[in-house]
Image (cartoon, coloured by chain):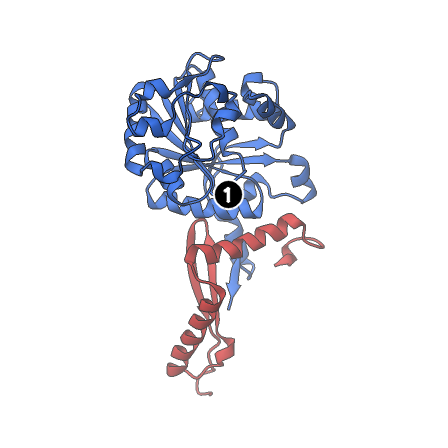
Chain colours: A red, B blue
C-alpha cells in the first residue's frame, strides 16, 4: 500500500489506511473471525467444482464512497491440469 | 415553516454543543429566528456554553410533561434579537422524553421560528433517537481523528436509515498538522465519510476562552473559528450558493484498485 507514497508513511496516511479497513468491517458487520469462516466456506464451494488451492482463495471487503463490495478471488488450475 | 437541524457526531467531545451554539448564534445574526434545543437530558451543556445557565426556570422535560407551555421554557438570549434556548433537564435521564414527544415539540417550534437546532447527545441510544426524531436534516460534526470518524460513520449510516439528509462539519482542524502529515485533512475526512462538507472549523484557542466566559465565539467575532461558523451559517441559510462544494467521490478507492491494491481486507 505504501508504494504510492515516498518513504515512510506519515501518521496521516496510516490513519487513512486503517480507517478504510475498520470502516469496511464496521459497515458490513463482519468481524475478523466470521470473515475467515466465510472464506473457508467459499473456498470449499469452489473446490467442489474446480480443484483449487484452498489457501489461495482471497476474500476482500472494499469500500467505495458509501458502497461496500465483497470480492472473491481464486487462482484456477490450467485447463486439463489438476 | 422553519427547518429543524440536528447536530450530531456519535463520539463525545468533538464539538456538537459548541457548533450548535455558534451556528445558532451566527444564523440569528443573519436575521433569522433561531431556537436551540439541548437534547442531552441529564448532561446538559448548551446552557453553560451559551452563558445562560443562571436563567433556567423550565426545561424540555417540563414542556413534554405539560408542566408549562414551551414559550415559558424558552430563554431569550439578550445579546441577539432572535435567539432562544430550550434547556435540557439535569435531573432526569434520556427516557423522560420519547421520539414522538420530540417530533411534536420540534414541530411546534418550527411553526413559529425559522430554524430549530437540536444539540444531540453523544452515543446512538435513546438520547440520539430522541434528538433525530424531529429533525428535517442533520449535520455531523467530526474531528480529523480515527475514533471520531469511525463513530461519525456509524451515525451517518443510522441517519441514512431514517432518510435524514446529512452534511458534514470537520472541527478542530490544524493546517499546520495536516501539512506535517500528522493530521487527516478535510479532504481525507470527506472522502472517507462521503458527505457534503459545509465547513471546516480550525482548531482555535478562542473557542476555549469564549466558552469559559459563556460567550459563543461568533458573538465576539474576531477568531478564525468564528469566521468559519459565520461562513457555515451563510451556507446553511442559502446565502452563499456559489460556495465551493466538496463531496467524497471514492477517489482513493478507485486509484487503489487501478494500482492493484485496494482499501481492502484480505482473508
* Residue B121 location, quadrant: top left
Q: Nearer the viewer, residue A69 or B213?
A: B213
- Residue projecting furthest to the right: A7
Give the total number of marks visible in the rendering: 1
* Residue B133 location, quadrant: top left
Vertical placement of A35 versus B113: above or below?
A: below
Where residue B190 sits: x, y (%)?
51, 42
- Secondary structure, mark 1, is loop
Where residue B180 sits: x, y (%)?
70, 42
Q: Nearer the viewer, residue B10 or B44?
A: B44
| Letter of the chain that mark 1 sits on in the rendering | B
Vertical placement of B37 versus B125: above or below?
A: above
Q: Can you see residue B243?
A: no
Q: Nearer the viewer, residue A5 or B57?
A: B57
Whether residue B26 sits left or right of residue B135 in the image: it is right
Where residue A46 sits: x, y (%)?
40, 78
Q: Can you see residue A13?
A: yes
- In percent of the image, x 54 and y 22: which residue is there? B216
The residue at which mark 1 appears reads as: B11
Q: Quadrant of the N terminus of chain B?
A: top left
- In percent of the image, x 48 and y 79: which residue is there? A54
Whether residue B5 sits left or right of residue B111 in the image: it is right
Q: Residues within 10 Å of mark 1 (few under 14, many from 20)?
A: many
Where residue A79 sits: x, y (%)?
44, 84
Amino acid at each position: 500500500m505504501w508504494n504510492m507514497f515516498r518513504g515512510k508513511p506519515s501518521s496521516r496516511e496510516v490513519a487513512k489506511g486503517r480507517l478504510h479497513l475498520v470502516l469496511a468491517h464496521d459497515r458490513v458487520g463482519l468481524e475478523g473471525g466470521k470473515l475467515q469462516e466465510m472464506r473457508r466456506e467459499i473456498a470449499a464451494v469452489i473446490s467442489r467444482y474446480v480443484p483449487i488451492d484452498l489457501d489461495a482463495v482471497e476474500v476482500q471487503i472494499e469500500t467505495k464512497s458509501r458502497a461496500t463490495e465483497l470480492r472473491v478471488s481464486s487462482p484456477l488450475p490450467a485447463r486439463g491440469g489438476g | 415553516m422553519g427547518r429543524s437541524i440536528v447536530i450530531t457526531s456519535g463520539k463525545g467531545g468533538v464539538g456538537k454543543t459548541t457548533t450548535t451554539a455558534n451556528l445558532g448564534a451566527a444564523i440569528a445574526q443573519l436575521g433569522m429566528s433561531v431556537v436551540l434545543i439541548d437534547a442531552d437530558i441529564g448532561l446538559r451543556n448548551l446552557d453553560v456554553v451559551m452563558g445562560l445557565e443562571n436563567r433556567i426556570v423550565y426545561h424540555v422535560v417540563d414542556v413534554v410533561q405539560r408542566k408549562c407551555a414551551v414559550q415559558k421554557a424558552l430563554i431569550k438570549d439578550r445579546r441577539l434579537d432572535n435567539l432562544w434556548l430550550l434547556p435540557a433537564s439535569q435531573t432526569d435521564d434520556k427516557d423522560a422524553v420519547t421520539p414522538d414527544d420530540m417530533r411534536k415539540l420540534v414541530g411546534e417550534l418550527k411553526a413559529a421560528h425559522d430554524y430549530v437546532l437540536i444539540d444531540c447527545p453523544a452515543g446512538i441510544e435513546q438520547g440520539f433517537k430522541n434528538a433525530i426524531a424531529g429533525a428535517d436534516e442533520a449535520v455531523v460534526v467530526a474531528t480529523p481523528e480515527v475514533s471520531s470518524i469511525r463513530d461519525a460513520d456509524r451515525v451517518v449510516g443510522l441517519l441514512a436509515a431514517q432518510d435524514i439528509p446529512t452534511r458534514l462539519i470537520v472541527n478542530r482542524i490544524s493546517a499546520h498538522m495536516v501539512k506535517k502529515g500528522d493530521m487527516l485533512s478535510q479532504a481525507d475526512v470527506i472522502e472517507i465519510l462521503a458527505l457534503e462538507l459545509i465547513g471546516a472549523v480550525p482548531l482555535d484557542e478562542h473557542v476555549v476562552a469564549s466558552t469559559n466566559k459563556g460567550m459563543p465565539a461568533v458573538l465576539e467575532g474576531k477568531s478564525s473559528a468564528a469566521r468559519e461558523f459565520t461562513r457555515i451559517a451563510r451556507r446553511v441559510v442559502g446565502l452563499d450558493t456559489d460556495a465551493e462544494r466538496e463531496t467524497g467521490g471514492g477517489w482513493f478507492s478507485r486509484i487503489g484498485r487501478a494500482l492493484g491494491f485496494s482499501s481492502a481486507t484480505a482473508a
